[in-house]
Image (cartoon, rainbow, N blue to C red):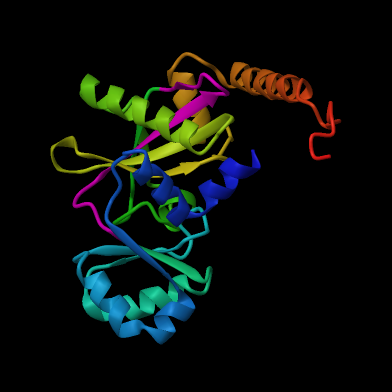
Amino acid sequence: NVLASAIGMDKVIQKQVFQNIGLPIVSYISFTTNDYKNRQSAINKQISTLGLPVFVKPANLGSSVGISKVKKQNELASAIKYAGNFDNKIIIEKAVINPREIEIAVLGNESPIASVPGEIIASNDFYDYDAKYIDGKSKDVIPAKLPNVVSNKIKTMAIKAFKAINCTGMARVDFLLGINNKIFISELNTIPGFTKISMYPKLWQASGLPYAKLIDKLIKLGLERHKNRSKLLTSYKPKSKWYE
């Protein structure tokens, strides 16, 4: 729906919602390009509290476009400028050291369910645009090789995130696993890739729901939402003039 997709597009708002409901997120700061122009020194001091390396990202974009991994202080300004070509709001996140990238699919309306988790093994230093779409060397492992307790925690967090931003139908929720399997929620995508080789349908295939039946289920969920909305009143007539 509109609300969920709007929140899902803005990485900053999304993190604020997740943090508010107690989901673990990486440390971050955000600012606008105009802020950085006027308060560069102060913002750089804030960034220094995160420590390097960091990821510099446009706040409202997908497919890892405009993202840079900054390992040295002298790379920071150019990374911010690059991200600013795509959005006037920038987010800088503390990098998780040697992370595992885990994705999980969620399906449903008021009672959503989660798929088995899958792992992305990126061909580059991180899962950037080239690694996703160009070089063809990234791999996925479905289901991800995780301890049951970690897998179950990720499923629970994915459903909690899905409900928190009022999602319906489908979403893919991305996580990072740090040292000792420490879990961080990365982001939620309300319109995930949906080709037969995309992670979302592959995760459901591995969970026992093949592609055709997944499409059938999504259609049924859409009809269910329409039926529920059609029961709501769209006009109102006061029973009495209480204001007279």
- Is residue 57 visible in the rendered image? The answer is yes
The relative height of residue 38 versus residue 225 in the rendered view (above or below) is: below
The x, y position of residue 211, in whole percent, is 58, 22
Q: Nearer the viewer, residue 170 or 117?
A: 170
Quadrant of the snapshot with the N terminus: top right
In the drawing, does residue 174 fall left or right of residue 69?
right
Q: Residue at x 18, y 66 (%)?
A: 51
The x, y position of residue 226, in whole percent, is 74, 24
In the drawing, does residue 24 fall left or right of residue 107?
left
> Any magenta on residue 112?
yes
The x, y position of residue 9, in whole percent, is 54, 51
Q: Nearer the viewer, residue 154 or 206?
A: 154
Quadrant of the snapshot with the C terminus: top right
Report how many numbered discs are placed on residues in the image: 0
Magenta stretch in the rendered image: 93-115
Q: Residue at x 69, y 22 (%)?
A: 219
The relative height of residue 168 versus residue 7 in the rendered view (above or below) is: above
In the drawing, does residue 16 fall left or right of residue 10?
left
